Image: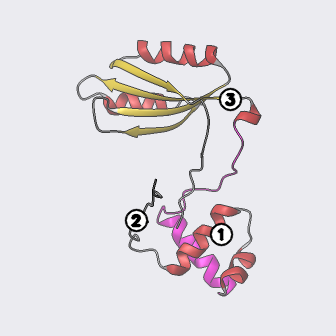
Amino acid sequence: MGKVVFQAESSAGNVDVVDRQILNLLQKDCRLSFNKVAGKIGVSVGTAYNRIKRLEAKGVLKGYSVMVDSAKMGYGLTALILVQAEGGHLIEVEEVVAKVGSVIAVYDVTGDYDACIIAKFHDRNSLNMFLKQLSAASYVKRTLTNVALTTVKEDFRVNL
């Protein structure tokens, strides 16, 4: 059987090679100082500082975070929940769901369902409680839940 090969997507505008280098470094270690960023990519500290501040102002750099192993923190259950909403109320449903602490992502999707929720739970009981509250929420027509059995890859960093 042949190898599966995926091609990289084309590059986005308004972000040049230096910006991409900076973003890649910060994704790997967001604690890097401006001095260390500058040294690693061969630009002045002022250039690194200005580039990072510009990326923040443009919303490309939305924040700084730490990658935590959710299972080691007691969130060993990952659920992918599809939601079908009534009429024009999808945004309302998504806004309510997005505020729940165990929800890590909410996406509009195509197909028979309107949204996909990715959430982490301590156990089946906490997932069950969430699903009951979600199903009872205003404008939720139906849900379809899948539980992840194994995590092969979980990394929200973008390979630039």
Give me the residue at 61% from left, 39% from top.
151
**The furthest residue to the left:** 87
Extent of the magenta region: 43-70
Q: Position of residue 104 (x, y in %)?
A: 55, 37
> For the point 60% across and 45% down, which residue is it?
154
Q: Which residue is mark 3?
A: 76
- The amino acid type, in three-letter code, at marker 3 is Gly
**Residue at 35%, 18% in the rendered image:** 142
Which label was assigned to residue 25? 1
Asked if labels 1 and 3 touch by Cβ distance under 8 angstroms, the answer is no
Choose between 31 and 147: the one closer to the eye: 147
- Distance from the alpha carbon under mark 1 to that under mark 2: 20 Å
From the top left corner, tell me how far across and down residue 62 is, in percent: 54, 57
Give the image location of residue 112, x and y in percent: 28, 29
Tell which residue pokes out farthest to the front in this image. 1
Look at the image and say whether residue 52 sits in the magenta stretch: yes
**SS class of the residue under badge 2?**
loop
Residue underneath mark 2: 9
Residue 82 picture location, percent across and down = 40, 28
